[in-house]
Image (spheres, rainbow, N blue to C red):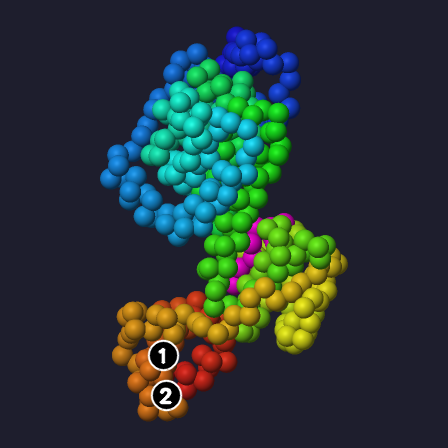
């Protein structure tokens, strides 16, 4: 019997021992098979890996830009989940639990002894589990009781949803574990809602100095966590699109440098004028899909320069004539030239990083030396 057939037989034996006829979610079956291929024994206690308090504090500090938005969502999620014997948790992008909230009954459960801050819940360590699958597959998942690989994890159902940045990188996972199996889809919906809310807050924070447009094919979904968000600079260059927005604009490669007018059939200037006078406009992308859009954030009021001009290293450039008489303007002008030089004379990249227009860069480069 070759290795593949041996693994397959072990898989069938495990299903039989758990009295599971059919596993509806392929990602569960695929995870079981990966565990069996690694030679894991489901009847044994999985390895435990918990970081020290010092390393946990360091990990929390490193993830503070995400945690500051996650922690309020965990509190809200905890209040929304019905039933007893449950917990909510936030894990970093590596699957290490950083924060938890338990109810009274769960705190007395044996699971609390292992689902603790600093514990790692990757699939490689803990076998099939909701948190680990969310990290590995980058998708929201439910792992119900007996669907866990290791027998010791089969008491609870786990619901997990990854948190993404606008580039599609996983920043962490929000997880809920409960024995309330009758409300699985409801619980997962709440967990996913919490993740999307965090993503929105992170996106807005990152592009706080830029114009942000919210959009959705159905106007009643605007201002909800299911809407798309697109951040732009003064020249109409797209700085970022959230994960939901990219799904709506499927087929467009946002890894390329794009302007608003390369994605939508209307000019950027025309839409900006309409957004200033109308609460809602309709825009159509070049693939023919129409969405409702509104000005989520005005932007263009603050920029990178005003907040960071004194903290960045500046090279020996002279300010242009129009800036030389003012100390603040001189520093700003020199900073633009410094960043332009660092970016190998790339106008577009410099404009994006500083949150200014290319026209502004042209003006300050008149006396580049």
Q: At 53% across and 23% down in the image, what residue appears?
A: 179
**Direction from residue 181 to residue 126 in the image, left or right:** left
- Of helix, strand and loop, which one carries label 1? helix
Residue closer to the observer: 8 or 40: 40
Q: Specify start and end residues of the magenta stretch as a single range.
A: 239-247
Quarter of the view holding residue 180: top right
Task: Give the number of callouts.
Answer: 2
Residue closer to the observer: 194 or 315: 194
Q: At 46% across and 42% down in the image, what residue appears?
A: 75
- Residue behind mark 2: 323
**Direction from residue 167 to residue 100 in the image, left or right:** left
Quarter of the view holding residue 238: bottom right
Q: At 50% across and 80% down in the image, what residue appears?
A: 359
- x and y, in percent, of residue 30 in the image: 55, 25
**Direction from residue 230 to residue 151 in the image, left or right:** left
- x and y, in percent, of residue 350 in the image: 44, 70
Q: Residues within 10 Å of mark 1 (few under 14, many from 20)?
A: many
**Is 68 colored magenta in this rendering?**
no
Q: Residue furthest left?
A: 54
Q: Which mark is residue 332?
A: 1
**Is 242 colored magenta in this rendering?**
yes
- Judge whether 93 appears above or below 330 on screen: above
- x and y, in percent, of residue 117 in the image: 35, 34
- Of helix, strand and loop, which one carries label 2? loop
- x and y, in percent, of residue 242 in the image: 56, 54
Which quadrant would the C terminus be assigned to in this image?
bottom left
- Residue 286 can be seen, yes or no: no
CA separation in Å, label 2 and label 1 = 8 Å
State if disc 1 and disc 2 touch (CB < 8 Å). Answer: yes
């Amino acid at each position: 019997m070759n290795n593949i057939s041996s693994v397959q037989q072990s898989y069938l034996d495990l299903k039989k021992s758990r009295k599971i006829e059919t596993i509806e979610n392929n990602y569960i079956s695929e995870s079981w098979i990966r565990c069996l291929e690694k030679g894991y024994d489901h009847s044994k206690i999985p390895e435990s890996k918990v970081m020290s308090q010092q390393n946990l504090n360091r990990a929390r500090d490193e993830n503070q830009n995400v945690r500051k938005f996650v922690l309020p969502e965990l509190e809200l999620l905890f209040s929304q989940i019905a039933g007893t014997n449950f917990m909510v948790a936030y894990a970093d992008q590596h699957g290490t639990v950083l924060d938890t909230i338990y109810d009274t009954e769960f705190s007395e459960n044996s699971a609390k002894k292992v689902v603790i801050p600093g514990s790692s819940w990757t699939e490689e360590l803990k076998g099939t589990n909701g948190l680990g699958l969310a990290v590995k597959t980058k998708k929201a998942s439910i792992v119900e009781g007996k669907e866990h690989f290791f027998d010791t994890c089969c008491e609870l159902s786990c619901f997990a949803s990854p948190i993404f940045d606008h580039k599609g990188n996983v920043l962490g996972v929000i997880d809920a574990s409960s024995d309330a199996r009758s409300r699985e889809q409801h619980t997962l919906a709440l967990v996913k809602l919490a993740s999307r809310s965090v993503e929105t807050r992170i996106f807005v924070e990152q592009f706080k100095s830029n114009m942000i447009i919210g959009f959705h094919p159905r106007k009643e979904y605007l201002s909800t966590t299911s809407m798309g968000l697109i951040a732009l600079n003064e020249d109409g260059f797209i700085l970022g699109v959230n994960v939901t927005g990219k799904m709506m604009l499927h087929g467009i490669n946002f890894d390329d440098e794009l302007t608003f007018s390369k994605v939508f059939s209307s000019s950027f200037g025309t839409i900006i004028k309409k957004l200033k006078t109308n609460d809602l406009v309709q825009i159509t992308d070049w693939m023919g899909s129409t969405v409702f859009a509104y000005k989520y954030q005005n932007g263009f009021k603050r920029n990178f320069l005003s907040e960071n001009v004194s903290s960045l290293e500046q090279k020996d450039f002279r300010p242009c004539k129009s800036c030389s008489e003012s100390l603040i303007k001189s520093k700003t002008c020199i900073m633009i030239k410094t960043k332009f030089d660092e970016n190998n004379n790339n106008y577009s990249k410099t404009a994006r990083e500083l949150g200014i227009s290319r026209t502004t860069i042209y003006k300050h480069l008149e006396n580049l030396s």
